[in-house]
Each structure stands twice: as structure tokens, then as C-alpha cells.
Image (spheres, rainbow, N blue to C red):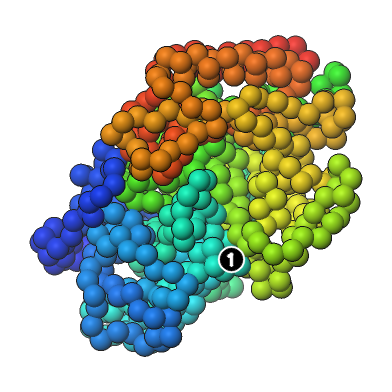
Amino acid sequence: MKRSSLFFCFILIASYSFAQKNSWKIVAGNITTPWADSVNPANVLAQYPRPQMQRNDWTNLNGLWQYSILPKSNENIPSKFQGNILVPFAIESSLSGVKKSVGKDSIVWYQRTFEVPLKRKSKKILLHFGAIDWQSIVYINGKKIGMHEGGYDPFTFDITDYLNKDPGQQLSIRVWDPTDDGPQPRGKQVVHPGGIWYTSVTGIWQTVWLEIVPETYIQFTKQTANLDDQTITVSASVHNLQPGDEINISAWKGDEKIAEKNSTDTFETLKINNPQTWSPAHPFLYDLKLTVTRKRKVIDEVKSYFAMRKISIAPDKNGIQKIMLNNTFLFEFGPLDQGWWPDGLYTAPTDDALQFDIATIKNMGCNMIRKHIKVEPARWYYYCDKIGLLVWQDMPSGDLGNGWEPRPGILGNQTDKARTAESEGYYRKEWNAIMDALYNFPCIVVWTPFNEAWGQFKTIDITNKTMQKDPSRLVNSASGGNYYDVGNLLDLHNYPEPAMPKPEFFGTKKAIVLGEFGGLGLPVNGHTWQQKNWGYQSFKNKDSLFMRYSSLITHLEELVRKGLSAAVYTQTTDVEGEVNGFMTYDRKVMKMPLSKLKEVNEKLYTIDSANDEKQ
């Protein structure tokens, strides 16, 4: 950080530190992860929240805020608040210090004060939100500055014109979230959790932060690697770009600058000679730097990174389509990852906790994660990029009820949901925003618009628009059924045994994948969310669990030889009443030894394919 900002942050932290440590505690009643005791209200999730576009001058606004739960009819900022809440943990979570339900008839008001530097001439102050679920109206010093609807995409307001002349400022936010009583995307959240449906998440659940930028600044970047051409194409959106301003784009391999373009264009292609490819075995990342200069003076600069990797499908010698990474077949295997925490719900207690799940998945011999019906903070994808895990990204589902309309699909007449214009609009807007926000993370190789016909609508149109928006990735149109002749993958779900459609029927057009299987359950005393638990197949001890798991992988090996391209095992951890995890919900018990899992799982990557290729 700059020296002025360091002083600003020191004053801010010092003023809140003592009060926060003495006015918050986790709400008892449920199991917690090992990181819960490390949560410090004066320093919550303090890491830089946007790894794909880094600047030095920023301030974290996580910590203790005031809150009130009021009737939905309340439109005015409260004069008094009911207590403190630890941001960015959802109000229903234990780590929030509140752990209260809200529902469609109520709203949550948030408020806190913050400071900005006195000397801020020719500077803009941006207020960033990682995610707020669902509808948020933001006020600065009592003045409404904007509204955002969407529970999974980041958003930003320029608050410069709303600030007081003195340092002290007031931030207030009104949040409404109808959960499963509304038509918006909401993933697995429900008001009454049970089975595969989990506790609702309302309000702020990702980092809130301030950024000081010049009047001309880079708003966002988009980078697309072309491995076959050995190029990286970079575009930048620059606010208030002036005639004559130049944009310098440079690529770096460690400390060595390997490519550079300097021009007045915001769109450039750099040649990357002899590129090192990114893969699970070798997750190499290049650094990227973008600088705006005016008369040779640096106006703004951001740092990013990229990878040279390609994901595609191509037929083997038997005509079966296979998923190819960097033009070579690599069987993809990993867990269905819900991304839930017993103490933080949608939010990991600490950054170390966020990394732990990813590292554990890699250490058990997996090379892929299916991020299921949820979107993670940017740092989660950054760690997947660094460690080398492929990611299949689901769109959070919503609007599961109401009528369905028959439409022609692969297997005769399929069904699409008859959504309202409002419901359809919410889906399209948020899916588009999610894809934009996550586009630059090379770990993501598959987009999944729909899962098991949950709110699935206008499948052909949604899939085609997803493919058009991002031709650099594969699209898994309908994971688990309700198939249409569109997209790149044909995805079957089957429990507990692995299975696949016949390659001769589907394999000539799409790669064949097993989007869910397994679900072997083992409750561990003292590490369950509730007394009543379930698994797709239940076991009483770790030995019998591993023997059954090993037999599933042996069966899976046979399917790989027949043309299966990928498989997803359910799941990373237990979640609330589900005990299907490799780990318990609190992450304190590994149900099967890591070394044995690694040995069994890695056999999947050495099986001879129909092209006699290995990786």
C-alpha cells in the first residue's frame, strides 16, 4: 500500500480493534471448523479480494457493523440498531455473531462508519462488494447511491460525489432476500432446510472494500489465451480515457518481460513464444501488467496473470468425442464441491480455510472440482489456478416450481420450465454477470447453465448464448438429464455406481461425462450437524467405506476405457444433514486416508484411451 493509505488503515484498525474484540463472539450450538477460533473481528478475511486485477491502494471494510432485522415495509435507515454483526458472514451463520433467520417478509439493515483521506483531489473512491444476497440498496451519508440485484456477482459504486469533506463517512445498506420464496437464483438455500437443501444465506457474504483510483482508471480487463496461435489477447475498459493516453500491456515470466505492446488501443494481442502450458501437473501462470500513461506519466496500473491452456473436444480413433486439455486427452476426476461451512455457511472462516479444501482435493489425487450450484469468492479460483485444479462452474439454480412445457430434446420430448419474464430476466442477468466476473480464471474449463432440470428453461437458447459469449470453454448444457441436442457434453448422474450412456449413441457429437456418482455416507460421532443424517449408501466404519469407494473407482476405470471423459464424485465434505463427504462438515476428520485415495484416484489418469494417449 501507499504510505498515506497505510496511515489511513492504521487509524481505522486502531479505532475499531479494541471494541470489536470485546463485542463479538461466535454463536454456539453447531459444530465449527478448526479456523473458527482464528477469526479476529478486527482483521476479518484481510487478503486482497481481487487477484485478477490488483492495485496497491485499498482498504478492507470487513469487521463489526451494526444491524437490524425489520419488516420489509421499512424504507428508512434506522435511527437505532439491534446489535452488531460480523461482516462478511451471513446473518444466519454462527460466525456473524447473530445467527437469526430473516425470510421474505423482513429486511436486514447494515451500517458502519469509515474514513477516507482528507487529501483526495483528482481521486475517485470506489466501493466494492464481493457479493450480497440478494437485493441491496446502498446509501452513503444518508443518500441513496444505487441498487443491485444478484446474490453471486461482485459490484461496484463510485461514491466520490457522496462523501463528506471531512474523513468520517457513513455506509448503510438495506438487504432483502426472498430465498426459495422468490424467482431469483439462490442455489441450495431454502427457508426450511432438509435433505439436499441447506440453510438460507441473507445479506453480505463476501468482502466489502474501498479502492482509491485516479480519475482515469482501468475498470476491468479481459484476457483470452490461444494456445494454437501462441497468443494472449487482452482488452481493457478504461474510465475517462483521454485522447493521447497510451496503454502498455506486458507479459512476464517471473522477472523476465517476454512480450509487450504500447498503443492507444484498449485491445491488443501479445505473442507468447514457446509457451509453457498450464495443466494440473504443471500449473504455470504468467504475470500480466496493464499501465495507462499520459505524456509518459503513469496514471494507473493494475497487475494480473494468465495461463496458456486450451480446453476442447475431439474424436478419438473410434469416433468418440473426448475432452482435450492442451490438445491431449486427460481424464478429469474430482468431487462435487458445495462450498458450505458449518460456522460461516457460504463464507469460509479464514483464507487458510478457503485454501484447505482446495489443497486437500489436490492431495487426494483429484485434478478437477465441480463447483456445484454456487459461486465462490475470487480468491478461491485464484488458488485453483495456482495449485492446478480444473473447475466446472455451475450456475446457481432458482425458481424450481410452477409449470413445464414440452420441447423436442435428444431423447424425444423434453421439458422446459415456463418461467415468468421477471424470473427469466434475473437468471440471464446474473449468469451473464457471473461469466464476466470469472472469465479471466484459467482454471474454469466448463460452464454448466442447468442442473437436473432445476428451473431449466429455454435450454437451447441459454446454451447457445453461453457458448457464443465464451467460445474458449466447454458448455455442459444440462447436467444430469433433460438433454437437448446442444452444448459440448452429455452428462449423466447415477448413484452410487458409476455409469455412462452408450458411446455409439451419443459419442459422435458430445463428450460423455458422469456429472455425479458415489455419495457414500459415513456419519462420524461428534462431527455431524444434526442427529438425523443420510447418504446414498451408508457405512459404519472407515475400512468398509474405503473398500466400497475403491470398488467404484475400479468400475470407473472400465468406463474410461469405453470412452468416458470425466467423472464427479459426491462430495468434498458433509453438508448439514448429508454425510456423503470425503471429510466431515467441520473438516476435522478425513474419512479415508489421503495416501490411499491418491493411489486409487491417480490410476484413472494412466488408463490407455482409444488414442493410446496418456498424461
Of helix, strand and loop, which one carries label 1?
loop
Q: Which residue is at the front of the view, 504 or 453?
A: 453
Asked if one can make out residue 57 in the rendered structure from this viewpoint, the answer is no
Asked if one can make out residue 40 in the rendered structure from this viewpoint, the answer is yes
Q: Position of residue 246 (x, y in %)?
A: 55, 62
- Please tell me whether residue 134 is drawn above or below residue 522 in the rendered image: below
Q: Name which quarter of the figure residue 430 lies in.
A: bottom right
- Residue for point 65% across, 19% down: 556
Q: Which residue is at the front of the view, 9 or 108?
A: 108
Q: On the picture, is 105 further left or further right than 13?
A: right
Q: Position of residue 92 (x, y in %)?
A: 35, 60
- Residue for point 50% across, 64% down: 179
Q: On the picture, is 506 further left or further right than 236?
A: right
Q: On the picture, is 120 further left or further right than 369?
A: left
Q: Position of residue 111 (x, y in %)?
A: 29, 75
Image quadrant containing the N terminus = bottom left
- Residue for point 63% across, 39% down: 445
Q: Provide the residue designation for mark 1.
A: 184
Amino acid type for the residue under numbered disc 1: Gln
Image quadrant containing the C terminus = top right
